[in-house]
Amino acid sequence: MESKAHRIYHLRLTYEKLPVPGWKDIRNTMDVHSLYWIMSGEGEFSHSPDEEPIQVKTGTLIYLKPGFSLTMSSSTDQPLYIRMLLFDAFDVPYEHAIWQKPVYLDTLDLPFIKLYSPEQAVWIHEQFKQMWSIQGTDPHERQAEFQYVLSRLLHYMRDTHASTDPYMKAYQQAKFWMETCYNRPLKMEELARNFHISVSQLRKMFMQQTGISPKEYLNRIRNEKAKTLLLLTEEPMKAIAVACGFADEFHFGKMFRAWNEVSPARFRALHK
């Protein structure tokens, strides 16, 4: 039986470094994954005194794995304004029809530093804005929303590397669409047409890059979203079905059992 794992991100802290001219600081909390989003300004980051400082400016996103030291300094004329997101990452293995204990991840497959285009920066800024504005009295619902938005952002970070290959670009756009619009009806013919690629070429690109078909990739996204909602919210099955792109509760239950060898209700009962 294939071994599976469910990825969970848990918010530790959000923090803003305000644009005070000429500030200097170090990374203080190092036992956690961190994203630093440069909202505005310019400055320098360095990992060690022996290394050349890295120039950072508006639109730069930095990923820091646990244990990675960092020294930061801000420009006097254009002080840095940074939003810092600190979170933990776990995989929950599923083996022999039993969910195992969570395994802490000490690194994620993300670019260390990248400067995004103005158009990309607008989208990334919106994701940080959403995570900063998550509210509600139920901590499980807040966690579910954070999990969704952060997962979407991390997928985007992995997939937005520059490419001159039109097939690769179409693949990346289609993949990103699935990851952000999985709750909508989807036909592969329409998806391929929207990104100016044939269905057969789109399938070929997915098989090369992920090892599975576009349809299977979409199913995995919907399955992971469903499991997150089942684990972290009290939403009824009908609402979860709609949120994950299923036509109705019956279809959702049928597909969930096929993917996980257990019904949605049983899955929730086993892990609550």
Image (spheres, rainbow, N blue to C red):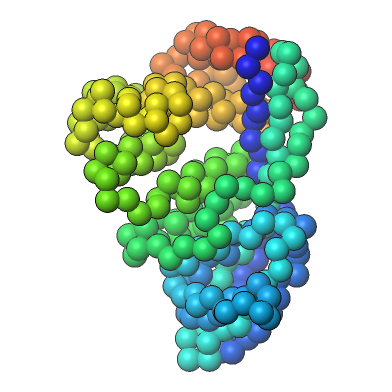
Residue 160, given in percent of the width and then of the height, sits at 40, 50
Query: In the displayed image of the protein, which residue is found farthest to the front?
Result: 50
Q: Please, is residue 150 above or below residue 201 in the view? A: below
Residue 26, given in percent of the width and then of the height, sits at 70, 76
- Quadrant in which the N terminus appears: top right
Is residue 244 in view from this perspective? no
Residue at 40% across, 62% down: 116
Is residue 34 in view from this perspective? yes
Q: Please, is residue 199 above or below residue 263 in the view? A: below
Q: How many marks?
A: 0
Residue 215, given in percent of the width and then of the height, sits at 39, 21
Observer-nearest of 266 and 88: 88
Observer-nearest of 164 and 262: 164
Observer-nearest of 168 and 63: 168
Residue at 50% across, 20% down: 241
Q: Please, is residue 199 above or below residue 62 in the view? A: above
Q: Is 94 displayed left or right of 127 in the figure?
A: right
Q: Is 109 displayed left or right of 11 in the figure?
A: left
Q: Is 142 displayed left or right of 100 in the figure?
A: left
Can you tell which quarter of the image residue 189 is in?
A: top left
- Quadrant in which the C terminus appears: top right
Can you tell which quarter of the image residue 72 is in?
A: bottom right
Q: Please, is residue 124 above or below residue 50 in the view? A: above
Residue at 55% across, 9% down: 258
Residue at 58% across, 10% down: 257
Residue 249, given in percent of the width and then of the height, sits at 50, 13
Observer-nearest of 59 and 125: 59
Can you tell which quarter of the image residue 266 is in?
A: top right
